[in-house]
């Protein structure tokens, strides 16, 4: 997303008003000064990183404890800014998620990402209506005062308005499914650079497809991620919790889906990979840190993804925007 363009647009509308830009991180690592520099250059307001341990308690919403960044809690108006794309649990990113998750406290994130909730049959990529995870996110965002959303679609279009309505319109415009009669035994997923920094993020491309409503995959299909993963598993608190859980159980990690597991945000990514591994094989290719991924039980290689996937592989170039689905 072109965040500086969004901030310039907001500055033109609200430039005389006092405000702060909070980079919504959830439990991911803080953005560096270099990464924040373009935002600060475009913003008339201070730009700060979210801190999940510096939140205030607003009560309860949607069955979850509501802990939110204090700047949002004190604001007269909260505006969500972000990109709309497919999301494993919320159906689509966007809307209230920027406030509820991006700027949520540790207890809120842990409550939203329990195994029981993220593995609920109605919690599914591409689904908004009847999705209990999205229902909780919307309730938390409304309690946090999120009243407006400025959102970007991958093709450069923008959608703005009340968060629920704007997200619904953006999701309809995204049209994320493409029907196919092909049943693939090998898939090459091109992970965009912004999502390829670590396997925590990059693996979403594979689980989005594997756990979509009608994946066009043969049993045992190989899902090959073209992702460099220079950060290995990832550097944030959530990524470290995910890595520790993955490393504690041998693949295909079946006991993560049935046995007792610790609570906490970040662990949900391990559950999704375990669900994928019950039917399919995950391989990360073109990887800069294959040993770090192998330590988690994930097959990884520095070899080119094309060579691993093979010449007949189904290629998916934008797995966070559009996915093939089995016809009918």
Image (cartoon, grey):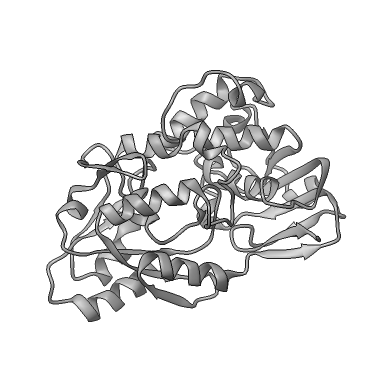
User: Residue 15's x, y, as percent?
Assistant: 17, 76
- Residue at screen point 70% across, 33% down: 277
User: Residue 249's x, y, as percent?
Assistant: 60, 20
Query: Left or right of 284: which side holds 245?
Result: left
Query: Left or right of 279: which side holds 111?
Result: left
The answer to whether residue 166 is visible is yes
Which quadrant, please, contains the C terminus?
A: bottom right
- Residue at screen point 43% across, 75% down: 159
User: Residue 42's x, y, as percent?
Assistant: 27, 71
The residue sitting at the bottom extreme is 12
Query: Left or right of 9: which side holds 58?
Result: left
> Which quadrant of the view contains residue 150?
bottom left
- Residue at screen point 49% across, 41% down: 231
Above or below, 306 against 150 in this view is: above
- Residue at screen point 61% across, 42% down: 121
The answer to whether residue 295 is visible is no
> Which quadrant of the view contains residue 284?
top right
Which quadrant, please, contains the N terminus?
A: bottom left
């Amino acid at each position: 997303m072109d965040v500086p363009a969004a901030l310039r647009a907001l500055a033109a509308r609200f430039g005389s008003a006092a405000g702060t830009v909070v980079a919504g991180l959830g439990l991911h690592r803080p953005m560096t000064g270099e990464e924040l520099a373009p935002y600060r250059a475009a913003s008339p307001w201070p730009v700060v990183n979210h801190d999940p341990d510096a939140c205030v308690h607003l009560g309860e919403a949607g069955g979850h404890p509501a802990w939110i960044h204090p700047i949002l809690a004190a604001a007269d108006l909260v505006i969500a800014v972000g990109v709309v794309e497919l999301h494993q649990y919320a159906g689509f990113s966007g809307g209230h998620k920027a406030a509820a998750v991006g700027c949520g406290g540790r207890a809120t994130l842990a409550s939203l990402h329990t195994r029981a909730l993220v593995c609920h049959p109605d919690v599914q990529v591409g689904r908004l209506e009847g999705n209990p995870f999205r229902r909780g996110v919307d309730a938390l965002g409304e309690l946090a005062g999120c009243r407006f959303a400025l959102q970007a679609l991958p093709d450069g279009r923008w959608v703005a308005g009340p968060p629920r309505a704007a997200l619904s319109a953006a999701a309809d415009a995204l049209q994320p499914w493409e029907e196919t009669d092909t049943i693939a035994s090998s898939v090459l997923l091109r992970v965009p650079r912004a999502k390829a920094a670590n396997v925590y993020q990059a693996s979403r491309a594979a689980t989005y497809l594997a756990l979509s409503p009608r994946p066009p995959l043969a049993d045992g299909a190989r899902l090959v991620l073209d992702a460099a993963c220079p950060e290995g598993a990832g550097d944030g608190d959530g990524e470290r919790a995910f890595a520790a859980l993955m490393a504690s159980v041998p693949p295909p990690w079946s006991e993560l889906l049935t046995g007792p597991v610790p609570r906490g945000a970040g662990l949900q990514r391990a559950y999704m990979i375990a669900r994928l591994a019950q039917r399919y094989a995950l391989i990360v290719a073109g990887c800069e840190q294959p040993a770090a991924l192998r330590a988690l039980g994930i097959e990884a290689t520095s070899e080119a993804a094309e060579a691993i996937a093979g010449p007949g592989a189904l290629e998916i170039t934008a797995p966070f925007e559009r996915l093939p689905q089995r016809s009918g």
